[in-house]
Image (cartoon, rainbow, N blue to C red):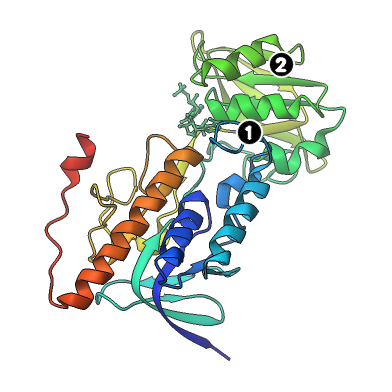
Amino acid sequence: MTNEFFEKVVIIGSGPAGLTAALYTARANLKPVVIAGPVLGGQVAWTHEIENYPGFPGGTGAELAETMKTQAESFGARVDMDLALEVDVSHGSPFTVKTGNSIYHAEALIVTVGASPRKLNVPGEEEYIGRGVSYCGTCDGFFFRGRPVVVIGGGDSAVKEALFLTRFATRVDIVHRRDTLRAEPEMQKRAYANEKINFIWNTGVDEIKGVDNKVNAVQLRDLKTGETREYATQGAFIFIGHDPNNDLFEGQLTMDEHGYVVTDNLYRTSVEGVFAAGEIQDPLWKQVATSVGQGCAAALSTEQWLEKREQQPSTVQPELDVTAKVNA
Ligand code: NDP
């Protein structure tokens, strides 16, 4: 049996942006419904420690997401642990969102579906996912107790996860394509001071190899000399950035050349009544704090839009001002 819901505000995604939008729209008495997605908190659920979100001096991402959810619910938000499979915004408001068992009709939609880890796209990567290839140290680190692993990438994710993996692994080699890290200085300092972490600079990974269905080596390429060598390891953790989860909106919302949903200063998308916040529309900062701020702003814009619409139902959204945000 299909459930059918008629809502004022539906939020797709339950990361910090989505749960903040839920809190604000709930406090505006709009009784928002969050379609949470595969896991409460989105990417934050996999973060083993959050240290840079003000007012939350330490704890796991999952704990932060649960606290945000409880707070939003206490003001009347509903969080459905369900997965949006189809969205239709092509006919204007009300919009429809379909999940496996339900259809939601929403006067306003807030899109906070986030981003996913980028793939290296080398031979062996797909084949050994779950057999030594991982995109989440928090989830899989435990399986690598007493084993050596490599971490690929040089940004905050790579270094943070490498530090976490030292709790389990005998040795963590960070393989990076340049000879300087992109990660924030504090994180770099900790990595350089950690005896278990070793750096393999100016190096790419051409292939992930295995025997008996398990990773046993990576094929490395020195990017300066072109020399290749096989390097023994039992795990390959890949942290080379993220891509926006835009599948549900392709051909429906305007996106930039990298697939991020384009929003203006009010977090409006190209479709009137559809707002977006967090990493689906932010290629730059990707912090819990920035996502929270964007979720809040998108919720306030939604609230204002619904209010104006009730007063003047025929109001037309002015043209999306992309440059205003880009130049801000
Ligand atoms: P980033 O884009 O910051 O870093 C990606 C890293 O992977 C870079 O070092 C990049 O190399 C490398 N890379 C990219 N593509 C390839 C490739 N095809 N092959 C090999 N290496 C590649 O991504 P992150 O996921 O680390 O971080 C995303 C955002 O999230 C950032 O804004 C970051 O600050 C934030 N973040 C913050 C955290 C925190 O605790 N403050 C924790 C985690 C993420 P190069 O440097 O040469 O470009």
As drawn, 285 above or below 186: below
Answer with left or right where residue 317 lies relative to residue 21: left
Mark 1 / mark 2, whichever is N-terminal: 1
Q: Quadrant of the N terminus?
A: bottom right
- The residue wearing badge 2 is 197
The residue carrying pointer 1 sits among few (fewer than 14), some (14 to 19) or many (20 or more) residues within 10 Å by Cα, namely few
Instruction: Identify which residue, 237 or 55, lies in the foreground.
Output: 55
Q: Position of residue 226 (x, y in %)?
A: 52, 13
Crowd tier of the residue under label 2, counting other residues whose Cα lies within 10 Å: few below 14, some 14–19, many 20 or above? many
Q: Residue placed at 78% from the left, 30% from the top? A: 234
Outermost residue, bottom side: 1
Q: Which residue is mark 1?
A: 57
Q: CA distance from mark 1 to mark 2?
A: 26 Å
- Give the residue type at disc 1: Pro
Depth order, front residue of 82/117: 82
Q: Quadrant of residue 176?
A: top right
